[in-house]
Image (cartoon, rainbow, N blue to C red):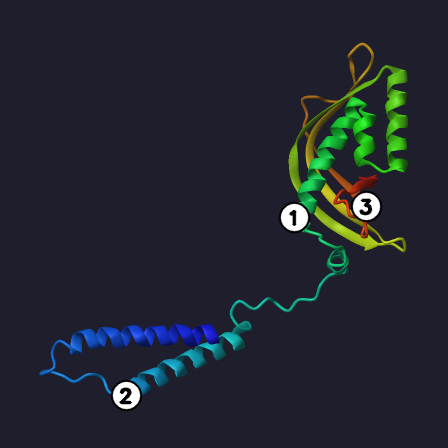
Amino acid sequence: MALDILILLLVVAVVFQKLWSVLGTKPTETRPISKESAEKIFDILMKENLRHSQKNTVDGGELNAEPNTELSETEKVLRQIPRFNQESFINGAKRAFEIIITSFANGDTTTLKTLVGKNLVKKFDEIIKQRKADGITAETDFVGFNSAEIVNAKIDEKSNAQIAVRFVSEQANVLKDAKGNVIEGDENFIQSITDVWTFEKSINATSPNWILVSTKK
């Protein structure tokens, strides 16, 4: 409301200036606008502004007011995480997703250990070792994301925040035997794959890094 009044005052000032520039050059034809007339003009503008403001309130709240919507349980949890920024988190999660699936396909456990929790990296390592023993190689061609969104969040009794993200990505995955023959997948076929990955971090940690602790389709 204060801003609206200020704008109206500026409008009135400009109107007076225009009138004065015209009327002041022709003193014999007309007189400068009187104080009473100025007050009437200002009063009309104020009433019009009040009517407009009341209409906006009735039609759905004051202008620029945030909608009074109730937060979801997930949003409530996210607000409890210090310095959490949803956009930055999603961008980081997408980057981690791409690195992890590529490292897993390449058997790069060194990289996996920096991004994946101990229990999960142990499972990844077992699969990688079994593939090597069987002479199987994996190839992953990551095309891109169709979507990535937070679907759940919680904080456990140890103050660890866990955020589940649903990724829908396009990939071409194949497994080849020791002779290079494709035994699973098709390198020319791009699949749309849905994964739900859970990332974890202590809310008391000073590091901004999250680690992957769970994966499921």
Disc 2 + disc 1, Cβ < 8 Å: no
Q: Which residue is mark 2?
A: 35
**Is 24 situated left or right of 164 in this image?**
left
| Label located before the other in sequence (2 or 1) | 2
Q: Earlier in the sequence, mark 3 or mark 2?
A: 2
* Disc 3 to disc 2, C-alpha distance: 69 Å
Disc sitting over residue 189 in the figure:
none
User: Which image quadrant for residue 141?
Assistant: top right
Residue 24 is situated, as x and y percent measured from the top left of the image, at: 16, 78
Q: Mark 2 is on which residue type?
A: Lys
| Label 1–label 3 contact, CB within 8 A | no
- Can residue 148 be seen from the camera position used here? no
**Is 194 in front, or is 99?**
99
| Amino acid type of the residue tagged 3 in the rendering | Glu
The residue depicted at 73 percent of the width and 36 percent of the height is: 96
- Residue at the spot 66% in from the left edge and 46% down from the top edge: 88
Q: Which mark is residue 200?
A: 3
Sequence order check, earlier mark of 1 and 3: 1
The alpha-carbon separation of the residues under discs 1 and 3 comes to 17 Å
> Where's residue 26, x and y in %?
11, 78
